[in-house]
Image (cartoon, rainbow, N blue to C red):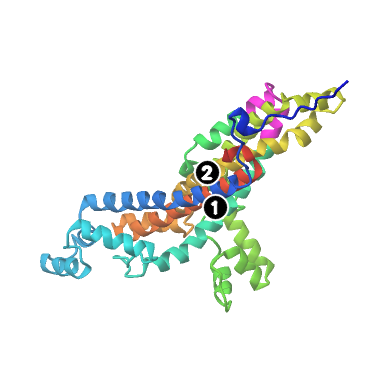
Amino acid sequence: MTTVTTRPPSPRATGRKKRPATDGGIGRYILIRFLLIFPTIFILVSMVFWLMRTTGDPITAALGGRLGPEQLAERIQAAGYDRPIFVQYIEYLGQVFTGNFGTTISTNRPVSEILVTYGLATFELVFYALVVAFIVGIPLGMVAAYWRDKSADAFLRVFAILCYATPVFFSGLLFKLVFAVYLDVLPVSGRASTGSELQMQLLPNQTGLYTIDAILTGDPTVLGDVLEHAVLPALTLGLLTAGVFLRLVRTNVIGTLGTDYVDAARSRGVSEFRLVRKHAYRPALIPIITVIGLQIALLLGGAVLTETTFEWKGLGFMLSEFLKARDFVAVQGIVALLAVIVALSNFVVDIIAALIDPRVRY
């Protein structure tokens, strides 16, 4: 008997194309996401410029009631605001992309200096808020999934709704009233007490991050004072995001518990608690990572009210001060920086999500 060996048809014979290799998928994904940063920043910066100019030139808006017509005209001409608006727009874009945000009208300080000085304070606050969001939202989301459709689950779902539905300024005032006024256990405002700030100012190389500067002083009381001042602002801003994380973790853990591999583990006698803690926990974190970029924007928006409520002198606090002074040059610089931060944060989060879950880049 003759044995006939058959070979699988080649792609040319069948007319099918080979599936492209996926090795370059992540590279193309990163490149596309990186290129999208520039139009995003361009659109946001342009919107800020044109919206700020709907009220007229910045000099008239800030000093219109305090200078005479001649002095006002001189200031406008010296600043170049008497030129066509489109010429000012092109010049503004050139300055922004070179890192020059102009000089504030109310304080006559370079805007870039203000961004560096107060931006570090906002970064520190957002970092603390994210720590609170992770510590509160993820474990409670797992608890809610474990006690699904029971009283504990119902309570935690209501708690999550209250967290992200309560205005930041209201929860901040409530925390101040309870912990700073009634109980008198935490500071009411500021980033540190006067004594601690003076001690940190003596450092030869200040970082601007009070936590690190407090560690560099070598005095535990300074570090404790800085952390005490950060508790209430971090809770106020962090609970806003913790509610979102709680709901996401609960929903995704419940969904993961219904998958085949979890059913197989359950059939082997694995306890429900271990299923939640070991098998369903990590897959549920992928959606958390994908929404962190959106939550950064939410935190930066909430930082304006949080910093104003607790007199935490960061970009949000200064933004409110410059808005009161109608210093639109400073406002443009701060909002432009926040737009850049949001765009870069989303880029980093997209890359992390693509590395964790390959389905994201297809």
Are circles 1 and 2 on residues that touch, CB within 8 Å? no
Of badges 1 and 2, nearer the viewer stands 2
- Residue 309, visible in the rendered structure: no
Nearest the eye: 195 or 219: 219
Residue furthest to the left in view is 70
Q: How far across and how far down the image is residue 175, in percent?
A: 55, 45
Q: Quadrant of the C terminus?
A: top right
Segment colored magenta: 141-155
Image spot of residue 148 (x, y percent):
69, 24
- Residue ID at (62%, 66%): 212
* First-in-chain label (1 vs 2): 1
SS majority, magenta: helix
Check residue 126 in the rendering and tell me which mark sits there, or answer none. 1
Q: CA distance from mark 1 to mark 2?
A: 10 Å
Viewed as shown, does residue 136 lie left or right of 38? right
Callout 2 environment at 10 Å: few (<14), some (14 to 19), or many (20+)? many
Assign a secondary structure to mark 1.
helix
Q: Which residue is mark 2?
A: 295
Q: Residues within 10 Å of mark 1 (few under 14, many from 20)?
A: many
Q: Secondary structure at mark 2?
A: helix
Quadrant in the picture for the N terminus: top right
Q: Is residue 22 at least partly visible in the picture?
A: yes
Indicate whether 71 appears above or below 283: below
